[in-house]
Structures are given as C-alpha cells and as structure tokens.
Image (cartoon, rainbow, N blue to C red):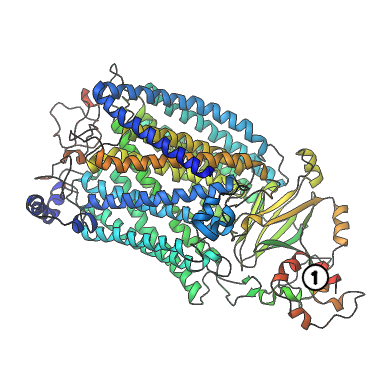
Amino acid sequence: MSAYLILTIAVLLFVVIFQIAKASEYVSVLKGEEKAFRQNNRINGFLMIGFLIFGLIGAWWCNKLLYPKTMLWQPAASDHGQKIDTMMWITLAITGAVFFLTQILLFWFAYKYQTSTKRKAFYYPHNNKLEVLWTAVPAISLTVLVSFGLYYWFKITGEAPKDAAIVEITGHQFGWEFRYPGKDGQLGRKNFKMTNAAANNPLGQDWSDNLNLDDIHTNELHLVVNKPVKIIINAQDVIHDVGLSHFRMKMDAVPGTPTTIWFTPVHTTKEMKEITKNPSFVYELSCDQMCGRGHYGMRGIVIVETQEEFNKWMAAQKPQYWAAFPDKAPGAVPAPPVTSDTAKTKTTLVEQTAKPVAQVVKP
Amino acid sequence: MSNEVSVHGQHGAATAHDVHVHEEHHHHETFITKYVFSQDHKMISKQFLITGIIWAFIGGLMSVLFRLQLGYPDSTFPILEDIFGHWAKGGRISDEFYYALVTMHGTILVFFVLTAGLSGTFANFLIPLQVGARDMASPFLNMLSYWFFFLASIVMFSSLFTQTGPASGGWTIYPPLSALGQASQGSKIGMDLWLTAMSLFVVSTLLGGLNYVSTILNMRTKGMGMTRLPLTIWALFFTAVLGILSFPVLLSGCILLLFDRHMGTSFYLSDIVVNGEVLSNEGGSAILFQHLFWFLGHPEVYIILLPAMGMVSEVLSINSRKPIFGYMAMVGSLFAITILAFLVWAHHMFVTGLNPFLGAFFVLLTLLIAVPSAIKVFNWLTTLWRGDIRFTPGMLFAIGFVSLFISGGLTGIFLGNSTLDIHLHDTMFVVAHFHIVMGVASFFGMFAGIYHWFPKMYGRYLNNLMSYIHFWVTMIGAYLIFWPMHYEGFAGMPRRYYSVSQWESFRHFDGLNQFISFVATVVFMAQILFIFNFFYSIFKGRKVVTQNPWHATTLEWTTPIRPGHGNWVGEIPEVHRWAYDYGKDGQDYISQITPVGEHESKH
C-alpha cells in the first residue's frame, strides 16, 4: 500500500515540476530571453559557489561521522598492514591537497567568471611554461608515490622468512577450510581427483604421501602473534579471495593455481578487543571475489593468540587421516564397513566439512 | 593531408550528395528507409541514443532494485513479488536475483549505454558534421553497426526472461564461475546469451569504429587539417582506435569461454571440484581469461571516458567564450592516454597471484596515466579562468564532469598503487572510484553532449528548468552516493555483498547503506525527469530559430537548422582556421569557415 502511495506522490511531484517548467519557459519569453538568461546564469553561479561551500562542509561532516567506522584509526593487525597504512596516509595527504586545490579553483572560477556585461573573455590559447609546470609537478609527485609504493610492495610480496609457520586455506562454495602441516611442519601432497568428502577427504589429500598423515584439518584459522605465517591459498570450484581487512591483506584463491601471502600478526584478538573497545570484536576472513549466490556469507574466523594458547588449541586437534581411516587412529575401535560411507549424500557434505573431527568420534 | 586531396577523395560522395539534396524535394522517403533502416548518420546516431536511453533506464532501474535490498535488507516489498515472482519471494529480492541484477547493471551500463549509447551516438552525429562530410565513409556499414547493436540488445534483453535468469557472475564474468552451470544458475543459458550478445556487440563496435576512423582520416573538408579538428573529433578518433584494437580480444576470450562451456576444452579450467563433483579438466588457467578480459576491459574504460572528455572540452570552451587552453597539449594527452590504456590492464589483477615483479611495471604505467589526466584538468581550469561563463545546461554538466573526473581520478592513484590495492581491491572503495570516474563522469559528458547538440539533432531546445533540476539533483546526489562509499572501502567492506548483517566488521554501515539507497532512488527519479524532458522536447520543445544558437565556431552550426541527408545544401564549406577562435581580437567568435583576415593576430 505504502509503495503505491509513494508512487502517487512521485507522479504528482513530476506533474508539478513539469507545469512549473513549462510556465517558466513562457515567463522567459515575456521577460525577454536576454534578461531571463542573465537571471538563470546568476542563480547557477550562486549554486556553484554554494555547492563548493556546502560540499566542503559536507565532506568534513561525513568524515566526522564515518571515520570512526573505518579501519583507518585502528592499528593494522599485521606488520605488512602497518606499511600499507603508512602508504595510505602519504597518498591521502598528496591526493587530498590536489583535491581541495582543484575543486576550489573549479567552482571558484565558475562563480567568479560567470558572464557579466562588464567583462570580456580573455583570449588565452596556450602558455608553454604553465603546461610544462603542470606536467612536471604531477610527474614528480607520482614518482614519490610510485617509489614508496614499490618499496613496500616488494617488501610485502617478497619471500617469507624461513621460520614462518605454514597454513593452507582452501575456498569452495561457500566456505573456508584450513590445513595445518602438523608436527613435521610440511603439508602433504594433494590431488584434486582424490577429493571425496564422503570418505572424509574433502581437500583431496593424497594418502600415499606420508607427509599427509599428521596434517590437521580445521574450520578456524588460528595464528600466533608476532610469528610470521605463510598462507598457501587454494580454491576448489571457482575463484574466491582471502580477504583479511584487519591485516590489510588479500589474495585470490584460484582453482588450479595455488597462491601465497605471508605476514606477521602483531595484535592478538584479545588486544584488538581492548583497542577497538568492542567486546565482540573478531578478525574476519571475507571472500572478496564474486563466487556465486552465497558469496556474501563466505565468512571465516581468524583467532590470533599467544604461542601457549595456540599450542593448547593445536594439541586438541586430530589429523584428518584419522577421520578418513578411523581404524588407524590410536585406540580406535575397528571401523564400520565402508559401504555405509558411500551412501552419504551431498546434503551431508556441508556438515561434514564443517566438523570433520566430530564425524570421527561418532562412529 | 592537403586540402585538395580530401576534396578529391570526396568527389564521389559529393556527387552522391547532389542527388540527395535533389531527393529532399522530389523523392519520398518511406518510413522504413527514413526511420528504421536509415543510412543517414544523424538518424543512426539518434537510433543509438534512444536505444541507449532505454537501456540506461533498465540498467538504472536495476540499480535501484538491488540498492533497495542493500539499504533495507530486513524489509519486504510485496510489490516486488507481484512483478518478479520467485525471484523476489515474499517481497524480498533473492540472492540469485541480486547478483543477476548487479551483473546486468554493470554489463548494460558499461557496454550498451556508455559505449554504444555514448560513442555510438556522438561519433555518428558529430564526425561528419564537424569534419565537413556528407556522411560516413560507408553509410551502409554504419547502418549495419546499429543493427548489430540492436541484435545484441535483443539477445541480452531476452536473457532476462529465461527460467534460470541472466548471467550473474559479475560483469567481468570470470571463469570458472561463468564456465560452470553447476556453480551458479546464472552460468546456465543466461551466460550463453551474454556471450552471444557480446559477440554481436563486438561486431557492431568494429563496423562503427572502422567507419569513424576512415571518415576522420579521409573525408575532412577542404582546409580541415588534423590540427584544426575540434577536440571532440580527436577524442572520438582515439576512442575508435582503442575499440578496434581491443574489442577483438574480448571476442576471442568469449569464444574460448564458449568452448570451455560446451566443447569440453580446458582453456580456463583446471583442478576443479564443484559441489563434490570432480571435473576432468586439467591444465587451463583461470587467470588467462582475466588477461584477455582486461586487455579489452581497461581500454574500455577510456572508450567510455574519452568521448566525454572531448565533448566537455568543446562545451567548456564554447560557454567560457574562450579557446580551449593548450589545444596541442589536449591532443597530446589524449594520445598518451590512448597508448597507456593498452599497457595497464594487469592493475586489475594485482592480487590474483600475478608475479610481483611484473606488477611493478603495471604500477608505474598506471600511475603514469595521472600525468596526461592532470594536464587535462589544469587545462580545463585555465579555460574557465577569466572566461565569460554561460551556464547552459550543457556547460553545467561539463563543469560537473571536471569535478567528478578529479574526484574519481585521484582515488585511482590509490588503486593503481599495488601496495594500497592489496587492502582496497574489490572493496566498496573500488565501486565508489569507478562509478565516479567512469560511470557518473562519463554520464555527465554524455549529458553535456545531449544538452549541447540537442538543438542540432531535433531543431528544438530542451526545457531549461527541468535541465537545471536534472543537473543539480544528479550532481549533489552523485556525491552523496559515492563519497561516503569510500569510507566503507576504508573499512574493508567487500563489494558485491548481498547483505552485511552477519559481519561484525561491516554491519555498522547499515544506516549509511540505507541513506545511499534513498539518494540513489531520488537520483534515478531525476533521470526519469530528463528522459521525459528529452522525449517531450523532441515534439514540443521550443523551436530553434537561429542557425547557430550557442555562437559556436564549428562546422555543424553552418548547416541548416534541420539538415537533410547530406548535411549542407550546396558546397561543403571550406575551413580556414582552428575550431577555437573565441574572444579573439575583441570578436566574440569567428567561425571556422571565415577566411583569415589581413590584420588578424596570430595565436
């Protein structure tokens, strides 16, 4: 009902504007085209300068309202993020100066040089000195930005330190899965053809590779504060993207082409709760590359903690190998016949991958 | 090129013209040959424009619909279910439908409105009129160009009515999402129709582009040297070159994607497990498509922007009653942008796992574009300086264009710098950036063009008051919509999210999203006002009674008020000077066809 009401109001508004617009045309004919033109010009000149003034006030007000909602004031949660933030402020300062200078000139000129009977336009087709000036100045400031940018870029994208921890992230429609290398510190080989969620191998680990036997599959990403971590990124079906806004990091997950990033988390989740004064603060892992209808719900949780906390959590995790072969797990009862596994349908896939460890305990 | 050559080169066309002028009096053109299968460049340009306006309405309406979901995620609008059925069950747009809307909004606005509707309209309309030609080099191919566009439109439009819906993987249609029907409803028949429509569209663009280039190079009137061309023509020339060299790459990308979809090839596919099903494809690269796509996709941005720049230069100069400042620098910067446009495509791919060393070159080349862009901005500012500015509706939009181009251009410096792109890539910051600089700015260029050349197109004026309302609502609205959106990007909020309510980091922008959606609806209404003004004025607008209402120097204003096919009655006038003699030697303006006087000063 209210939709129709709004539509009716809109239509009426249209009719009113149209009638006034038509009338104004007749009025301008009566008044004389020249006079009407000058009057319109003055109004638009005032609107130009008004737009500038209210625009500047609006920009200030908008900043006041929204700045606290951004991450600009929060410290970046990784060392690379700190570099990116520095770069961001340098760029904001330079572009901000250019923005205010040019916008003010634009609207000021529009207002100041609006047509007047007292003034004639100044014939000024070119001036080489000026043109060289405004080729050179932008070129120099961009050199500064490019140099800083590339300096940081190579630091961020360079090789990860040798002692970096390793985690593998795999994206699929619509969720994330994580794999830790276990005690041996190395991830086992994968083969996408072996992927079989029903057989508790949702990532396609190749069980013939012994490195796989202690690999741990989790559905939360736990990181150790102040310890560099190298993340190996995969996707199973379509392109996803590992977006870690608090860490200022991002990398696509491409099927068939593993990618990597590395960084050092510098604040634990607990610290960030205090810094942001938000008790429900949580590091979120978002999918930043359009991946289908559930794109917006592809949320992962990242927990940054101390080494002790991490060790405690890790000790409670069990290798995926035990889930796939329950009979091989230490102290396990003989496994039920495999045939019951194959009966599992796609619908159970989601819960399985979400809690692979829990699945093991039940049978 | 000597003037003699262009005259002789046109000999055939000139004789043809005599026949045409003759025809105007004796031969009855049928409705079909005059309005439908017309070979008159002016009629074809109007066909492009009106088709573009219809598409803009559809594409704009789509944005209102998905903004409704973003702004009011918890409300229901029963009217939506009445119209869209299962796409909006319970009055709430479904996520599938949301993504289909976002995808089609992008595709329609980028290709069907701002490519075909913008350069299709103004290249067709202005090139023959401003270079002094009877028509395009090949009026027949020109007509085909429109009808291929029309065909593409029909195919694209039909995809909206399929059971599984239109393409829904984003306008960039990255595979494997777009290649696998199992991965998304929109990757079924909708995607095939998308690819078919775009292939037809590429044909249309090539037919048009080749015509534009050959007309500009070969059919200029006597005296019209390349350096005497108005900047609109230069811009349209470079646009056509960009299109000719880059659109075929999109076509190849589309064809390979069709192969992957239907012929079992693996150009883009490798190691895929979708919904538990292991696919046999191996060895392809999903990133290959992105290279092919952006090799068109980036020049495409300039295909959209350059005509707007050209028209804005023209309109600013005319209404400041001053020559454009630094004509040669303007041409040079257009040229530089054209070259650089081909060398920056991978800046869309900094976080795809692209080699960082390679990325560094793309950073350098991308930020280099800021130099010609800065030259243009400062030259526009200097053109206004000490002018005698008339705020015609066209002029308002031209000034608005400069403002938006500055705002959107500066945020490009953030995104082009790979270090910052890591954080900002695919966030709302990107959405704000490209909507301002290539979306709204190009629309402003287009509006400047429409308001300025409407009297030449239809022999009538648009209503002034409605034009002013249209401008101010759009200008203020554009900033209200896109300025705060940068802040969402600074918070890392990803683009293309159907809802942010479950995200601790982003959900506090709910109020802002609502505000943006509200303003977007108001701005859309202002566009309806424009569309109404446009069609009303074609039939009922104030009649143009003088040949040169804006007191402009260029050739199109030397034709009759309502020029027939062939444009000039009698000889095509000879050109004696550049297009920007405004305010010279105390004269308001000197037309290009006025011979250089004895005591005239040199510039």
| Viewer-nearest residue: A114 or B32 | B32
Residue holding disc 1: A320
Image x and y of residue B324, in percent: 31, 34
Image x and y of residue B293, in percent: 47, 60
Image x and y of residue A103, in percent: 46, 30
Viewport quadrant of the C terminus of chain B? top left
Image quarter of residue A39: top left
As drawn, is A233 to the left or to the right of B377? Answer: right
As drawn, is B449 to the left or to the right of A338? Answer: left
Please name the residue shown 19% across and 56% down the image: B31
| Viewer-nearest residue: B217 or A29 | A29
Image x and y of residue B260, in percent: 50, 72
Q: Is residue A107 above or below residue B436?
A: above
As drawn, is B505 to the left or to the right of A136? Answer: right
Please name the residue shown 82% across and 50% down the image: A305
Residue A99 visible:
yes
Badge count: 1
Residue situated furthest right in the rendering: A331
For label 1, the SS is helix
| Viewer-nearest residue: A33 or B549 | A33
Residue B361 visible:
no
Please name the residue shown 20% across and 38% down the image: B557
Image quarter of residue B250: bottom left
Q: Is residue B457 above or below residue A310?
A: above
In which chain is the residue bearing label 1?
A: A
The amino acid marked with disc number 1 is Gln
Residue situated furthest front in the rendering: A1
